[in-house]
Image (cartoon, helix red, strand yellow):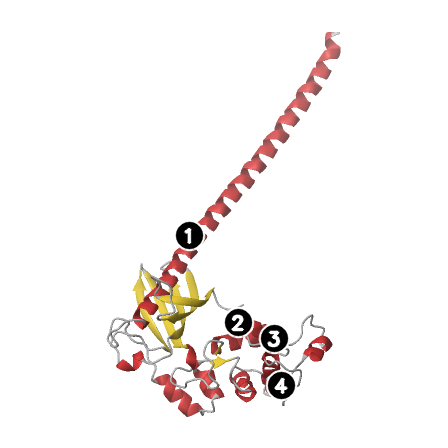
Amino acid sequence: MTRLRRPRQARHRGAALLLVLWVLVLLTGLIAVFAATARTEALQGRFLARSVAARYVAEAGIEIAALRLASADTTRMWLPDGRPYRFELEDAQVEVRVRDESGRVDLNAAAPELLAALVVAVGGDPVKAPAIGAAIQDFRDGDNLLSPGGGAEDSDYAAADLPYGAKDRAFESVTELQQVLGIDHELYVKLVPHVTINTGLARPEATFADGPVLQALGLGGPQVAAILAGREPLDPTAPVAPLAASGTGTYSISSRATRPDGTRAVVHATVRLGATSGLGQLYTPLAWRVGDPD
């Protein structure tokens, strides 16, 4: 009887040992997965903390710009023509650019010809540009008549298999430009920095306009180059000329912050200064975006 039990006991011991080995393998795998997950979450946490810190520094750049623009001392005001102001804040390098909104092309007021010229200036197809300018006109006007140069009304949107037609009302946001027939994502990204809905001006002010807008206004290459060359970076702490006091009071501000570890953040804001702001507010935000258009 004893001789018969030994092989069976040996088999049981072998099965138990195999089970223990499988449990050890399973536990080792679970520990490895847990360690990898913990490391990944720690890295994500550190990246998130650095990103948030960079974003807050960039937002501080917006506040500093608004404070300078609202200053009663014209020698301390910043020039709103898009030139860079660079300074250090909380160990981060900050670059702020301010542009008066009157230097941008108003989507609700500009003529189709000016809109088409802007499309060409930002690198759009010059053959399609007149039709795109006319399509922007048709998108915002209240009639169903095609504008000269091509344009696009409801039937054209239906033919393009789009589930919407021309809005037939004014643009309420620059992002609506993406809905205009003929404007793809690539062209939209190129146009966004140069357009607005906040001025009501048929033609932008060249004093505050950037390169593509100056080209759209008909200025030649040498003229554009000369204007842009005069917008050198300024020390943000240095006094500037009273020219800075000019402008409409509505500004686009771009603030980029770069931390010592290389983490970057960019905040774009459109603000309106003055009496329209609420109690205790330096400005009224009209638009606020973190990151570049995508």
Where residue 115 sits: x, y (%)? 54, 84
| Residue plotted at (59% across, 30% down) | 24
Q: Callout 1: 10 Å neighbours few (<14), some, many (20+)? A: few
Q: Nearer the viewer, mark 1 or mark 3?
A: 3
Q: What is the spatial separation of the Cα atoms under label 4 and label 3, in whole angstroms?
A: 14 Å
N-terminal of the pair, mark 1 or mark 3, is 1
Residue 173, label in figure: 2
Q: What is the spatial separation of the Cα atoms under label 1 and label 4, in whole angstroms?
A: 47 Å
| Residue plotted at (62% across, 75% down) | 167
Q: Are circles 1 and 3 on residues that touch, CB within 8 Å?
A: no
Where residue 197 sits: x, y (%)? 49, 76
Where residue 196 sits: x, y (%)? 48, 76
N-terminal of the pair, mark 2 or mark 4, is 4
Q: Are circles 3 and 2 on residues that touch, CB within 8 Å?
A: no
In the picture provided, is 132 more to the left or to the right than 74?
Answer: right
Q: Secondary structure at mark 4?
A: helix
Note whether residue 23 is visible: yes
Label 3: which residue?
A: 184
N-terminal of the pair, mark 3 or mark 2, is 2
- For the view shown, which residue lies furthest in the top direction? 1
In the picture provided, is 133 more to the left or to the right than 65?
Answer: right
N-terminal of the pair, mark 2 or mark 1, is 1
Q: Secondary structure at mark 3?
A: loop
Snapshot quadrant of residue 77:
bottom left
Q: What is the spatial separation of the Cα atoms under label 3 and label 2, in whole angstroms?
A: 17 Å
Q: What is the spatial separation of the Cα atoms under label 1 and label 3, in whole angstroms?
A: 35 Å
Q: Are circles 4 and 3 on residues that touch, CB within 8 Å?
A: no
- Label 4 sits on what residue type? Ala
Image height check: is 116 above or below 23? below
- Label 2 sits on what residue type? Ser
N-terminal of the pair, mark 1 or mark 4, is 1
